[in-house]
Structure formats: structure tokens, C-alpha cells
Image: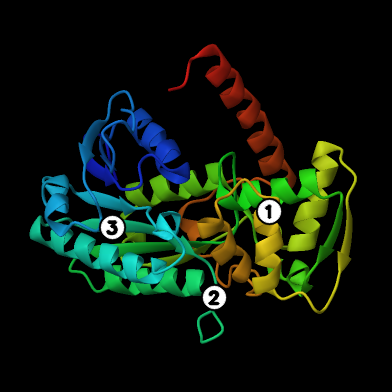
Amino acid sequence: MDINGKKVLITGATGFIGKRLTRVLLERGCRVRCMVRRDNAGKPEGAEVIRADMLDRNSLLPVMAGVDTAFYLVHSMGGGRSGFERRDREAAANFVCAAEANGVRRVIYLGGLGETGSRLSGHLASRMEVADILRAGSFATTFLRAAVIVGAGGASFELVRGLVERLPVMITPRWVSTRCQPIAVDDVISYLAGCLEDERTAGRTFDIGGPEILTYREMMEHFARVEGKPLMIVPVPVLTPRLSSYWVALFSPVPPSVSMPLIEGLSSEVICREHSIRDLIPLRLSSYDEAVRRALAEEVVIKDQHEKGGVQ
């Protein structure tokens, strides 16, 4: 499908995924409207920026005007751990009302990968509930389910890096043996943009992951080897995910409101159960080590730009 000139809304436009997706869609000729909560959030060159709050339904109505497809890339964990499920639910319901009122045709949602059921963590359960709310709307919802996204500035990446760099000897809970399927952030962006371009993805749910299935222990060991750092991991059976989330918060740059729900979800296996998106949007998926090297290199560039005053 030709997306040149199509009006696209990106919620969470200043976030880890939103900033990258904005750049890519502008390069592909889309008319991009970025929704931000603060006036000083910065204006991507070539994009329209409009201020609104997902928890203020009235503020969302003008944001949706003239929009063909909206990307839903927001969550409420950054607003504090208490009550994030309620905030997620309210934000999704407000979004649906505003989108329906403006005749939005498609929504593309990036959520979490995980099994359904009562054992799902609060974070993953909230991501699934948001998907259900969006899919109940009158528009066609594409739901991409991702596990650990590896990229500079991403919460999962920063959690792993913080542990590897600050704890050369780690006493860990059993969740280090849980399997997951990490995916490079660039591949996530390619899938999101690809879904916009391919109408066959409308109204469907896809699991997205990288080419490898690794345990969290293996992810940390791979990370340490890429950085050339020593690492010893000693699993113990008595440390629960909830207890471990407290000491992880001590050694991670990620705010506890975000890191603690993530850690508590690590006991759930998050691997792709279907791979149909690979047929619709064929990519050469990056390995975990490639994604880590790219993220580390990007952080060096970002730091250099900040020091030179090139990034606001």
C-alpha cells in the first residue's frame, strides 16, 4: 500500500519506540502527527506536534482529526507503580472513544508477549487488557506482541546493562532460567512500519521476536561477553521475582515504577508461538549480540551529541 501522504498519529512519540518510528515514517513520506504531553517535548523536523493527555478524553478529540492510522505506543508505568493498570485501562478507553468519533480507520498497537491466564504478571496482564479494549473499537486493530526489545534507552536493555556492569557476581532467583525471545529495536520499527504499509496485517495479532530464544541468564552472559566484562551468576531458589525486583532497582538506572513490574513479569516465558508476520513482512532479523552492539554504539553517539550540544 502506498503510505506517501497518509496522515498518521503516533502516541508516545517522544518515547523509546515513538522517536524512532517517527523518523522512519517521515523518511517514507508519511504526514506524521506526534502526540505529546508537554509543550517542551521537542519537535521532530517535518512532523506536526500536538499536545494532549491520554487521561483527558476531551484533549484527544482534536488529536485524531483527519487521522487514517494511529500507533498506540503508550503505557502508564512511568506515572508511578500504584494504579498503573487503572490508568492503562482509562487511557485505552479514552483513545477508543476519540478514534471512533473521528473515524480513524486503523490502529497499530505494540504490546507485550506472554501467555494468557491467571499467572500473568500485572504488567503483562494490563498490556493484554489494553489490546482487548482497542480490539473492541470500530477500527481495525493490529496487535504486535513483543518480549524484550533491545535498544539504547529501552527499559529492558538498561535493566540488563545495569546488572552486568554493576554486579560482576550476581546471586539471582530462578527467573534467570526463564526463556524469552529478544528482538532488536530496529526490527520492531521495521515491523511497525511494515504493518502500516501492508493492509493484510489489519485486524490481526502477531508475535514478534528475534531469531534466538535465550534465558535471561544467557542474555546477561552474552551482554557481558560483548562488553568484555567478567560475570558470575549464582541462582538461588529462595529469591522470588518480587524480592529480586527490590535489589534490581538498586543497580538499575530504570525508575522503580517501570523496573519493578518488568522484573515481576520475568517468571513468565515470553517466546513467539506463531511466526506468520515473517511471511508478510520478511526481514533479516538481528541476533541478540548484534542488537547489543548496535545499542552500545548508539549510546556513544548520543552521549557525544549531548556533550557537543547537538541534542536538546
- Measured in 3D between alpha carbons, the distance from the residue under mark 2 to the one under mark 1, in whole angstroms, is 21 Å
Question: Which circle, 3 or 2, is nearer the viewer?
Answer: 2
The residue that mark 2 highlights is: 121
Query: Where does residue 134 sit, x and y in percent of width and height?
Result: 28, 68
The residue that mark 3 highlights is: 107
- Measured in 3D between alpha carbons, the distance from the residue under mark 3 to the one under mark 2, in whole angstroms, is 25 Å
The earlier-in-sequence mark between 3 and 2 is 3
The residue that mark 1 highlights is: 250
**Residue at image x 60%, y 19%?**
304
Q: Would you say the residues marked 3 and 2 are in contact, meaning their CB atoms lie under 8 Å apart?
A: no
Query: Where does residue 264 sit, x and y in percent of width and height?
Result: 61, 70
Choose between 215 and 161: the one closer to the eye: 161
**Residue at image x 48%, y 16%?**
310
**Residue at image x 39%, y 64%?**
143
Q: In the rendered view, does 39 fall on the left or right side of 310?
A: left
Quadrant of the rendering where the N terminus is positioned: top left
Q: Is residue 7 above or below residue 108?
A: above
Q: Amino acid at mark 3?
A: Val
Q: Is residue 119 above or below residue 256?
A: below
The earlier-in-sequence mark between 2 and 1 is 2
The earlier-in-sequence mark between 3 and 1 is 3
Choose between 178 and 91: the one closer to the eye: 91
Residue 23 visible: yes
- Measured in 3D between alpha carbons, the distance from the residue under mark 3 to the one under mark 1, in whole angstroms, is 37 Å
Q: Secondary structure at mark 3?
A: strand
Q: Quadrant of residue 239?
A: bottom right
Question: Which circle, 3 or 1, is nearer the viewer?
Answer: 1
Question: Please, which residue is most extreme toward the top here?
Answer: 308
